[in-house]
Image (tube, rainbow, N blue to C red):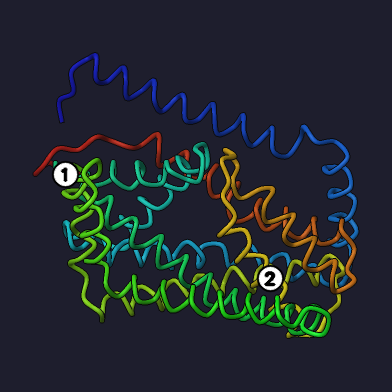
Amino acid sequence: MNINPNRRFLLLSGKILVVVLTLFLLHQAIFTTPDTFLSWKQILHTALDSSLTGLFILVAILIPFNWGFEAKKWQLLGNKLEPMSFARAYRAVMVGLTLGFITPNRLGDYAGRVLELKSQQRLEAIGAIFIGRYCQLVATVLVGSLGLLYFILRFYWGQFPGVALSILFLLLVLCIAMLVLLYHAKAMVAVVAAIKPLRTLVHYVAIMGEYTSAEISRLLLLSLGRYFVFLIQFILLLILFGVRLNPVEYVSGVAGTFFLKSVVPSVSLLSDLGVRELSAMYLFGLLGEGRLHVLSASLSLWLLNIAVPSAVGLYFVLRLRLARKGVPA
């Protein structure tokens, strides 16, 4: 494919900027907080010297499965726009992960996946990407609500039954509303069309209404599959770092943590960091677990599932080409 010199220069400059910014943020996130880093390093060293080292290896083995579920979702979503192999969908997810790493609330994920499409109707994929992310949010809220139910009944029902009942009712309404909206995505498109300042966006999100109930159910199952891979990874890391609980407490604590991380707004470039750690320390603190051990597990989860794959994704970003309609990428 012929690309004029100016366009080639801009593309190369963009790639270099992504590489530099990604590496800089990785450094900032891990090495510029000495106390946290040294504490985490010491606990990690102790954990890896224990008889449970195999758990860390198992968590690492699960990383490709985590993003594999996401790639399968994107393949199903993207096929509405153009035929897409699983390998190509996986590549798009990795590019999106890297670009999302350096943008608030992972907005770069949209750009990464759009750029991997071949057709000139790339921006029509925005609605497809949104549905995929919304499915993951629904999975998080459904399971997370059950996790929070455990904490509400155990720690708050006795002293604040009225407040606890109100929260439970709100969680139930939230779950039902999100499921109804998911299976009636055309309503979301209609809302966008009804709001005058947003009408110009209708063309880009119209695809959301084209997915059948069967396709939505499949997407939701894939989202739940990815969610449980994440949950298992977190539990294994908690065990590795010396957090000792019963199975219900493990699942409830992790599910509640993911729920709070997903619903609390964040404008941080490293949005996965901070909210999840605070949520994990609070919920597991209620269960009597030490702050640093929970923090170590949470940081390790972020490092293995977000930071490392983002660095690997730089390879795919550097190989990225801006394809035109009908031209292989």
**Left or right: 240, with 306 as reference point:** right
Q: Mark 1: few, some, or many residues within 10 Å (few <14, many ≥20)?
A: few
Residue 9 position within the rendered picture, expressed as x and y whole percent measured from the top left: 31, 17
- Under tag 1, what secondary structure? loop
Q: Which mark is residue 78?
A: none
Q: Which residue is mark 2?
A: 254
Q: Is residue 125 above or below residue 26?
A: below
**Nearer to the camera, 270 or 159:** 159
Q: Residue furthest top?
A: 6
Residue at the location (64% across, 74% down)?
232
Nearer the camera: disc 2 or disc 1: 2
Which amino acid is tagged 2? Val
Number of residues whose C-alpha sits closer than 10 Å to that of mark 2, classed few (under 14), some (14–19) or many (20 or more)? many
Question: Which image quadrant for residue 326?
Answer: top left
Q: Is residue 303 left or right of residue 283?
A: left
Is 37 drawn above or below residue 28 in the view shown? below
Report the residue at 79% width, 62% height from top: 282
Looking at the rendering, which quadrant does residue 136 occupy?
Answer: bottom left
> Which quadrant of the rendered structure holds the N terminus?
top left
* x and y percentages locating residue 192 in the rendered image: 24, 53
Counting from the top left corner in percent of width and height, residue 293 is at: 85, 60
Work out which residue is located at the far left of the displayed protein and give it.
Answer: 326
Upstream in the sequence, badge 2 or badge 1? 2
Q: Secondary structure at mark 2?
A: helix
The residue that mark 1 highlights is: 328
Task: Name the residue rendered at 30%, 55% in the picture.
Answer: 88
Q: The disc labelled 1 sits on which kind of residue?
A: Pro
Q: Quadrant of the C terminus?
A: top left
